């Protein structure tokens, strides 16, 4: 008996040692995720429009390169296509993608660097989600949250920490930091006027809403948590215009997927909140609008367009949302500040969770397998891929670098553009001068 207990104990300690080593994650100095094949693959139009196999199908949770050729119908051409799609770092669907990659040559592009590997999630988690990805010039750092959609029989837990990527270090250092008071299941976030604003889901005991955080001291303050006494359902993401108007999404994530909030009291929707006057109203979604579980939000540089993603009931539902909608914003119209809401694009891989816009109007959506890039008209230009098996959740531009938070790794890639969001130049240049903020 004794020896078997000892045996189990030593097995347990091996596992404990394994997880202790994992706990802090790994900061990797510029490890490129490349092999010896062309990193840029321009997909021939012929094989896009007519798949080179007689019979095939593909589940919406998988990637293009995981298309299944059904029994007895595989061909050299389909194997070759899947291999080229799988092995490239960048897929080109339109010539304009080469401009973004800054690559004249057709087969070499920038490198998608893996700069951090996340530690294993807690045992109750079904998987990890990394969202928020918000830059603050005051700390010259990026913050993002980690969420743990739970396995059946569990509910999500409010983690007291968020991740911070310190860009003043070379290579950047990613580590856990502890906002105070702690956040309650934070998700998306936006930088505005010296502060980071988190959209947080809330839980059974703390209503969700918007929380402002000082990016240097990490002190937090709840700035919105109800609408006429109603809790929000699960605020998911937020953006704020330069003149202080916030747009945030609210869905049933906490109740349906995280099993950690009270029953929803309101419809799913997109909300508009004038921070200075306190006016809060739903601007899309109520009364049968296009939204079931709206998710990411993004503003273009002129702040006259708002992009909103929609997941639908679940990401594996074929009839789910997986759409990016485009709205027009008119800040001077108090009566109808938000109009439109047409389909901008529909995703073939999971759903666009986080979205970002660059200064040239391109829209980036984080999906299964990588980041989909669209021009201002919604035409897909290409795909920036992440490691095989990983899912790009959200992104953040810092200068020409696009940081991509995946479920498993943090990546960055240098592109020939910058983000749509500007930062106060005074703060930024003092950061650069002192090389530390
Ligand atoms: C919700 O969470 C509770 C407490 O963790 C758990 O007992 C229950 O089984 C969970 N429900 C589901 C549907 O997973
Ligand atoms: C809700 O989140 C808070 C942190 O803000 C935590 O202290 C509390 O235990 C959580 N409640 C539940 C029921 O998980
Ligand atoms: C920015 O914050 C300052 C106080 O720190 C406040 O006076 C000002 O109104 C804010 N500006 C906007 C656009 O919210
Ligand atoms: C989606 O969820 C809503 C609300 O829970 C439900 O009424 C609807 O039937 C669901 N639709 C699908 C396609 O599952």
Image: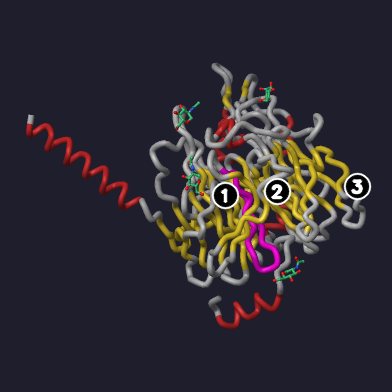
Q: Crowding near pointer 3: few (<14 within 10 Å), some, many (20+)? A: few
* Residue 77 visible, this angle: no
The image position of residue 56, as x and y in percent, is 62, 22
Of helix, strand and loop, which one carries label 2?
strand
Disc number placed over residue 378 in the picture, else none: none
The magenta region covers 186-202
Question: Which residue is at the far bottom?
Answer: 433
**Which color mode does the image show?**
secondary structure
Q: Quadrant of the C terminus?
A: bottom right
Residue that badge 3 annotates: 336
Q: Crowding near pointer 2: few (<14 within 10 Å), some, many (20+)? A: many
Is residue 194 on the magenta stretch?
A: yes
Relative vertical location of residue 313 with respect to residue 87 in this rendering, above or below = above
The image position of residue 292, as x and y in percent, is 71, 32
Of helix, strand and loop, which one carries label 1?
strand
Please name whichever residue, 377 or 176, is drawn nearer the observer in this view of the structure: 176
Residue that badge 1 annotates: 186
* Mark 1 or mark 2, earlier in chain: 1
Q: Crowding near pointer 1: few (<14 within 10 Å), some, many (20+)? A: many
Disc number placed over residue 373 in the picture, else none: 2
The image position of residue 336, as x and y in percent, is 90, 47
């Amino acid at each position: 008996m004794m020896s078997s207990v000892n045996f189990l104990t030593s097995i347990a300690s091996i596992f404990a040692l394994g997880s202790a080593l994992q706990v802090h994650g790994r900061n990797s100095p510029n490890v490129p995720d490349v092999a010896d094949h062309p990193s840029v693959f321009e997909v021939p139009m012929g094989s896009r429009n007519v798949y080179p196999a007689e019979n095939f199908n593909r589940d919406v949770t998988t990637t293009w390169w995981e298309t299944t050729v059904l029994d007895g119908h595989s061909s050299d051409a389909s194997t070759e296509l899947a291999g080229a799609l799988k092995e490239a770092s960048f897929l080109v669907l339109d010539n304009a993608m080469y401009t973004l990659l800054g690559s004249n040559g057709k087969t070499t592009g920038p490198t998608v660097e893996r700069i951090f590997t996340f530690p294993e999630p807690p045992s109750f988690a079904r998987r990890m989600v990394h969202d928020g990805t918000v830059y603050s010039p005051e700390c010259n750092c990026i913050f993002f949250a980690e969420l743990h959609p739970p396995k059946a029989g569990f509910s999500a837990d409010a983690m007291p920490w968020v991740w911070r990527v310190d860009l003043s270090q070379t290579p950047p250092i990613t580590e856990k930091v502890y906002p105070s008071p702690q956040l309650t299941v934070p998700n998306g976030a936006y930088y505005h006027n010296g502060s980071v604003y988190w959209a947080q889901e809330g839980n059974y005991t703390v209503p969700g809403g918007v929380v402002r955080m000082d990016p240097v001291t990490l002190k937090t303050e709840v700035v919105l948590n109800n609408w006429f006494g109603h809790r929000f359902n699960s605020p998911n993401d937020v953006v704020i215009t330069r003149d202080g108007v916030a747009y945030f999404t609210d869905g049933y994530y906490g109740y349906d997927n995280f099993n950690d909030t009270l029953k929803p009291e309101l419809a799913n929707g997109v909300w508009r909140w004038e921070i200075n006057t306190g006016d809060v109203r739903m601007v899309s979604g109520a009364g049968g609008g296009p939204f079931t579980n709206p998710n990411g939000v993004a503003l273009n540089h002129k702040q006259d367009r708002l992009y909103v993603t929609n997941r639908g009931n679940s990401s594996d539902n074929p009839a789910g949302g997986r759409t990016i909608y485009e709205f027009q914003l008119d800040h001077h119209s108090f009566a109808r500040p938000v109009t439109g809401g047409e389909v901008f694009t529909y995703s073939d891989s999971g759903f666009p969770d986080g979205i970002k816009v660059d200064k040239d109007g391109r829209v980036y959506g984080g999906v299964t397998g990588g980041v989909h890039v669209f021009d201002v008209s919604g035409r897909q230009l290409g795909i920036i891929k992440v490691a095989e098996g990983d899912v790009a959740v959200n992104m953040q531009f810092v200068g020409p670098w696009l940081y991509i938070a995946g479920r498993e790794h943090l990546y960055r890639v240098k592109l020939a553009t910058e983000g749509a969001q500007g930062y106060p130049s005074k703060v930024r240049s003092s950061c650069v001068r002192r090389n530390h903020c």
